[in-house]
Image: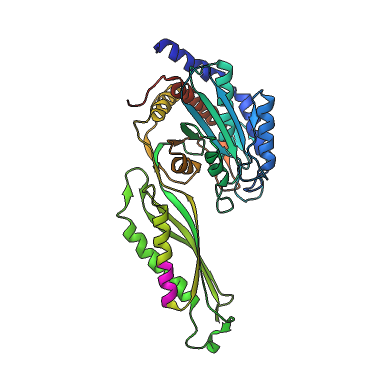
Amino acid sequence: MDNASDAGRMEEVRSAVNRERLVETAMSLISVPSPTRSAGAVADRLAEILANDGFEVQRPVADWPEAPAVVVRLKSDRPGPTLQFDGHLDTVHLPFVPPRLEEGVLYGSGASDMKGGIAAAVEALRALRESEALAGGGVLLTAHDHHEGPWGDRRQVRTLVAEGFVGDAVMLPEYLADRLPLAGRGMAIFEVSFRREGDPVHEVLRAPETPDVLAAGAELVCRLRNMNRSLAKTSDPWSGRDTVFVGLIESGEIYNQAPVACSVRGTRRWVTPGRTGAVEAGFRELVDELAVASGTSATVDFQVQGDAFRVSREDAIVSAFQTAYKAASGGELPFGGKPFVDDGNTYAALAGIPALTHGPDGKGAHTLSEVVEVDELVRVARVYAMTAVAYCGGVVQGPE
């Protein structure tokens, strides 16, 4: 490849990113409330924006007719890999905060998580088309509902993968900007419920043989604390260590009543890919043993949000990203681990493709105070567009 022409294409697509158009897209998306499982209206808005831009839009149902996904492809006229930009349009279930722009800062529900990031990916797609900088391959843009747990179950991503809406690598504009994550933990949200027969009863009228559901819940918390200590030996240099965490225990109605049920909720996280089944089985075995010992019945709701994953630092997408990041920011981004679970975990597990999470340095995710600087959205749009140029057109190559 000619280095001068490569640099020229990178600069052309970088310059094609339009700040005002990006902000208009972000504010338009934020203005439509879209709690998880109710993102149909904002998906329609995104589809309308893309169609008005002249893109051919597909709307696969993806196992959720209430909010069909949004899919757009941009192809060059030469062979090469496909880079996917993927984002979720749904937001957590908090009161809606409308968008506003003040002194170069964007506020509102989804500003950082992750409608701002989706707008940046859309602007990258526009810049790639207008600059005609793709020397090969193509870009696939996908956007969907059903991301945020525990309301969503990732069904749309799983169905998109099953139906072939997947690239050779995927980038996700979540609010992580200080590292390039090469590994991330799997994660499940659990709720364990212990129950006994009969009705609630005053403590002094409680028969001695009555199972104590609250004691069972407390014992589970203690056993999970011990498990967490033993899990420390399973670790990864990027993503950290296996953990189990309890954040909530609920039981009873008043202080001197023997309750009939107790609920314990928390998370289980793991660093080793492919261990989802074993992790769940081990957790259920611990609960079953405790239920028998306490004379209670127990149910376990174990909602897997995503499996653990790893990306090779030698993969072509990593080299392409660093080439683009350096062109946009002047230096390479340090490697690290992903502290949360996103849809990249699902793409890595089900599609077997490298998944890179990188987005704007947004603040306030999962709060009423989401905020992101417009400069960050512009930077992300440029990085995404230039990564596509480098990855799809062969400016950099992976290992032979």
For the stretch drawn in magenta, the main secondary structure is helix
Is residue 296 visible to us here?
yes
Q: Position of residue 372 (x, y in %)?
A: 56, 36
> Dividing the picture into quarters, in which one does residue 145 lie?
top right
Q: Is residue 49 left or right of residue 263?
A: right
Give the residue drawn at x 41%, y 29%: 317
Q: Quadrant of the N terminus?
A: top left
Image spot of residue 11 (x, y percent): 49, 16
- Camera-side residue of 304 and 16: 304
> Which residues fall within the magenta stretch?
286-293
Is 150 rendered above or below residue 225? above
Decide: is 156 above or below 189. Answer: above
Quick check: is 178 in the magenta stretch? no
Residue 174: percent from the left, percent from the top?
51, 39
**Residue at the extreme front:** 163
Q: Quadrant of the C terminus?
A: top left
Q: Is residue 99 visible?
A: no
Instruction: Report the front residue among 101 and 12.
Output: 12
From this view, report whether residue 204 is shown above or below residue 101. Answer: below
